[in-house]
Image: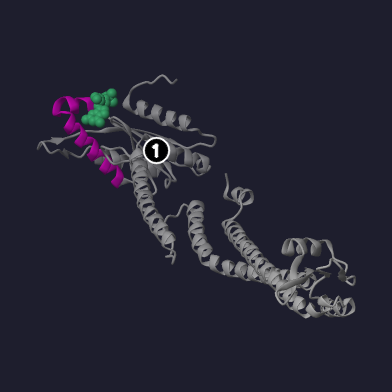
Amino acid sequence: MKFEDIKTEKSSIRNKLRKISTINAAVILLLCWLLLFSTSMLFIKSYEKRNLELIANTLSTSLTAATVFEDSYDAKKKVVLLGSQGMFSAAKLVSSEQTVLVDWQDTTNDDSRFQRLLRQWIYAEPLTVNVTHEDAVVGTLTLSGTVTNVADFIEYSVIILSCSMIFVFIVSFLVSELLHRGILASFRNITSTIHYVIRSGDFSPRISGSSTKEFQVFSEDLNSLLAEMQTLKASLLRDNKSLAAKALKDPLTGLANRTAFISKLNQLLDQQLAQENFVLLFLDGDRFKSINDTWGHAAGDEVLQSIASRLSGLVTKSDLVARLGGDEFAILITSMTSEEELQQLTTRIETSITQKIAISAGVNITTSVTIGYAWSQHGDSVTSILERADMHMYKNKGITKVSG
Ligand SMILES: Nc1nc2c(ncn2[C@@H]2O[C@H](COP(=O)(O)OP(=O)(O)OP(=O)(O)O)[C@@H](O)[C@H]2O)c(=O)[nH]1
């Protein structure tokens, strides 16, 4: 799978970090919101209940005289005075004779569903206190709490609390984005280096240090891996080069081998150098077997090495001398222009090879080669030109070779 495909299919580390910090902040803020809200509600409940008790006790004291004298008018005045200030939503004063002196209900406020639920939760049921005179109960006062002010307070609190939480959420999101930058930069530093290495095959780049411990350790590990890969690649390249060179060289003489020779010949033919005429010389040792038989195989090897070095010395750098195998050599000459020049070269070769060869056994060996050659022709193939040179060589050796 390509990196680009992964990029489109999977979410980025930036998005993952963003998601984690967003969920984290949202959960924490929601819990904070719930905690603050429920604590405030419990506090409000206890405060409102105590407040109603206080109002009831104060009112019952001020209603004592009116209750004793069953002065309904005065009692109602006092009740309405406080009730209309929103201290309670309903009040009922009953004397000990069971006479209802006051039965007041606040009709100005129409409770919403929320307010009804709130009142039910805070007060559960109306509060009843005794009206006493000289330690005797002269009546009972029943008050129902009001939640109008509390409901407004709760609504405002919820709005302010929610806005504060949203503000904190935004700030925490921005701060986490800022903090993630360092991590993302370290991560990008690593991935961009790795992608460069993968694309270029160049193991020389190194990942720079990171302030994050784990990234630093990871970078150091990757750097040592890259260094190892670099060394390995360099040694592989060296080995490949030397193997390739070996594969094209004759191990005994150091000349090009048959493979290298055929490849060069192919190259010349492909380049249409055939039109410019090059020459292929084919050389075969004369009675080489007898050298081996007389002086031994090692001596034969030395003779072959000596022939190789003499041939190399007789041609230019642009020519190619190869050992095709056994005592067979070939030369590709691209700098030759005339038959006369060629005859001079073959004479120089024959003269050079027939010079005595001093071998390490302390004897001088004399040998010779038979040369055949072929000029390149238009439309030549490797086989056709080799065959002509081969036939020519056999002809010069005095052997008639049946072609095919
Ligand atoms: N010392 C040595 N001898 C080799 C090597 N490769 C082949 N030979 C020998 O070279 C000889 C080549 O013999 P031929 O080309 O068949 O015959 P020749 O004796 O040269 O006779 P003509 O070619 O007919 O003149 C054989 O005896 C091979 O064993 C080698 O690497 N080292």
> Is 307 within the magenta?
yes
Q: Name the residue under label 1.
A: 261
Q: Which residues lie in the magenta part?
A: 288-313
Residue in the foreground of this view, choosing between 79 and 10: 79
Position in image of residue 385 (x %, y %): 46, 32
Residue type, label 1: Phe
**Depth order, front residue of 150/159:** 150
Q: Quadrant of the C terminus?
A: top left
The residue that appears at 36% across and 26% down in the rendered structure is: 395
Residue with the most extreme left position: 362
Relative image position of residue 301 (x, y in whole percent): 21, 34
Residue 164 sits above or below residue 248 on the image:
below
- Residue drawn at x 59%, y 62% is 28
Up-down: is 399 above or below 196?
Answer: above
Residue 7: percent from left, percent from top: 60, 52
Q: Where is residue 146 in the image (x, y as percent from the top left)?
A: 79, 70
Q: In this view, does 399 lie above or below 36?
A: above
Tell me which image quadrant ligand 1 sits in.
top left
Q: In terms of image quadrants, where is residue 18?
A: bottom right
Question: Label 1's element?
Answer: helix
Q: In this view, does 93 lie to the left or right of 332?
A: right
- Quick one: quadrant of the N terminus? top right
